[in-house]
Image: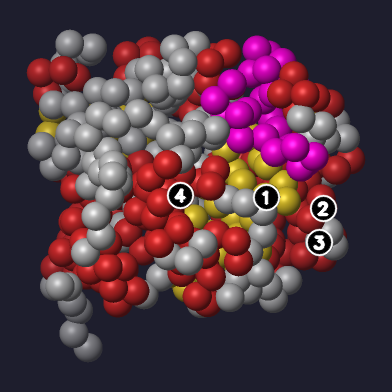
Amino acid sequence: MVYQEAVEWLFAQSRAGAPRGLARIRALLQRLGQPEAAFPAVHVIGTNGKGSVVAYLAAAFRAAGEPYGATISPHLLDFRERICTHQGPIPEAEVVRFVEWAQQQRWQEPVAFFDLTTALAFHHFAAVGVRVAAVEAGVGGALDATNALPDVRVTVITNIGEDHLETLGGSLEGVARDKGGAIRTGVPVVTGAEGVGLAVIRAIAAERGAPLYVLSEGSPIFDLPAQPSLRGRFQLQNARLAAAALRLLGYGEPVLSTGLSTAVHPGRMQHLTYQNTPVVLDGAHNPPAVRALVEEFEEFHLVFGAFPRKDYHTMLQTLLPRARSVRYTYAARGALRAEELLQEHPAPYFEHPLEALHHAVGAAQQDGALVLVTGSLYLVGQMLRQLQAQHLASPKKVG
């Protein structure tokens, strides 16, 4: 088996309609010798900003010289981005070995992609001897595979917003209960949640005796010792949450300063130049993320692609008033097609993201505005792949 075959097999695995829960991940981890018990973790939960908080935490662990692990979801260009340590992304050979092992197992319930990926991450972390991990939840909290972690030192709940409503209870209160269900007895909680979501989290934390630190209440624990490296005003909240978690873990101000100012998280407010035109790539994929994103720009030429399970109607209602022009594209397998997107607002549709970008750049060159590519992190990943392929295929200058 080669690496790409292993990744394709992982993505093909599904729980086949079985309910959400921890039974599958626990069975996996038991057969692997309980690797999740080998390291303490920061559990990062929330609707938006999880990956950015993990990026800040990982940069701080690196600044401290700590053997660390970090998980994110989804990835942009390569599956290995989902599982990183102080040694770098997980080696391809280890992914292949794990898949070959998993294919030989027999399970009472079919194990899904995220169960397998989480088990692989924990197994890898234990193998390389990480001393702390920043672990991003997938969907929700209480029933997410990452909640199999036995030694959580800090829980970060970034925010509570309108995403995965059909999975997490159908309302903001239901989303908050599911995410807040991962709060551990006596373990500190750091959150930027507001309104109904905060009320639910506050109640759960009180019931479980978990110290609660709320960003909106202005505690000095959220102070920023340095300018965050990730762009966007919304990133200030993510940086403050990471700073609070790091202080609760006992890290000093020099480590916080270096970590916050050196974090890298591609695909989030990523600026580049294409054909001498400014382009911003951002993986905003739900209404709260899009609302935060549009506050960064007065106007733009829009390239949009999304998935039918997302509230793309509300996302477009937020984006279109500031868009000088619009074009749609196919984000990735399973994404919205032309007939679905064109019901929202008449605009050109492009099968390939790079074609949509080229069309948008043509419009932007007429008025000097930038191009914004958004709607899905998968779209951003596809765009980056096609840009890389174009660069590699371009004739090289000689002499």
| Alpha carbon distance from label 4 to label 3 | 31 Å
Q: Which residues are magenta?
A: 177-202
Tell me the mark number nearer the camera, choosing from 4 and 1.
4
Identified by mark 4, the residue type is Arg
Amino acid found under the numbered disc labelled 2: Arg
- Asked if the stretch drawn in magenta spans residue 133, the answer is no
As drawn, 217 above or below 222: above
| Position of residue 363 measured from the top left corner of the image (x, y, whole percent) | 25, 33
Residue named by callout 2? 247
Mark 2 and mark 3 in contact? Answer it, CB < 8 Å. yes
Decide whether residue 194 is among the magenta residues: yes
Q: Name the spot of residue 258 as percent of width and height, x first.
A: 72, 64
Dot 3: within a 10 Å radius of its alpha carbon, few (fewer than 14), some, or many (20 or more) residues? some
Along the horizontal axis of the image, is 369 left or right of 393? right
Residue found 60% across the figure and 55% down from its top = 134
Q: Which mark is residue 26?
A: 4
Judging from the image, what secondary structure is the residue with disc 3 in?
loop
Q: Nearer the viewer, mark 4 or mark 3?
A: 4
Image spot of residue 383 (x, y percent): 26, 48
Asked if residue 75 is positioned above or below residue 378 in the image, the reply reads below
Q: Is residue 222 visible?
A: yes
User: Nearest the camera: 209 or 304?
Assistant: 209
Mark toward the start of the polypeptide (4 vs 1): 4
Counting residues from the start of the chain, the first of labels 2 and 1 encountered is 1
Label disc, if present, on residue 152 of the rendered structure:
1
